[in-house]
Image: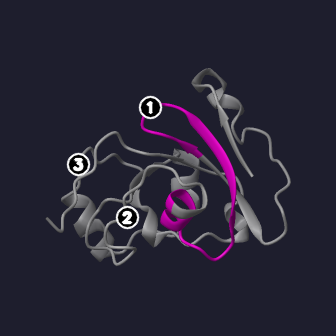
Amino acid sequence: MFRLAVPRLAALCCARRAYSTPGKVKVCVTTQDGTQAEFEAPVGVNLMTAVRDVAQLEMQGACDGCMVCGTCHVYLSKAWYEKVPEADDDELDILDKSLEVQDTSRLACQINLTSDMDGIEVTLPKKVANLMM
């Protein structure tokens, strides 16, 4: 299930708790151009896989989740940043080298979706740098 909404409806994306399919969680993404995308992803996959492969949104994920490139950099909403497990030192090292880092920046490859993450809200940065190059 994939749905796009106009940016002015951003407040409605996942604002109300919708029921997800068992074994899946709802993910709400604001893309680089401000478009809102809402989709379901299987529990157990990482957020990078959900955004890039399930929803087929623009995310490079050049190292395929090995935490060396920084191209899966995302911003979590403040509420969700406080709910997901903290970044470890290796992830923080990659983020230190990334572009446009914010207080709620994370690498999507390091966030494994759990049933508690239904409705997670993320924003894709306008610019990312591939640290492998």
Could you say whether the residue bearing mark 3 is in a helix, strand or loop? loop
Q: Identify the mark nearer the N-term, 1 or 2.
A: 1
Residue 95, numbered circle? none
> Which residue is drawn at the image coordinates 23% and 48% (left, top)?
99
Q: Name the residue under label 2.
A: 61
Query: Which quadrant holds residue 12?
Result: top right
Was residue 12 drawn as part of the magenta stretch in this picture?
A: no
Of residue 3 and residue 10, the one placed in the foreground of this image is 3
> Which residue is drawn at the image coordinates 53% and 57% (left, top)?
51
Was residue 32 drawn as part of the magenta stretch in this picture?
A: yes
Residue 99, numbered circle? 3
Could you say whether the residue bearing mark 2 is in a helix, strand or loop? loop
Amino acid at dot 2: Gly
Give the percent coordinates (x, y) of residue 92: 29, 66
Q: Mark 1 points at which residue?
A: 33
Give the percent coordinates (x, y) of residue 105: 38, 53
In this rendering, which labeled residue sits more in front, label 3 or label 1?
Answer: 1
- Distance from disc 3 to disc 1, alpha carbons, whole Å, reads 17 Å
The way the protein has been coloured in the rendering is one colour
In magenta, the rendered stretch is 29-52
From this viewpoint, is residue 84 visible?
no
- Distance from disc 1 to disc 2, alpha carbons, whole Å, reads 19 Å
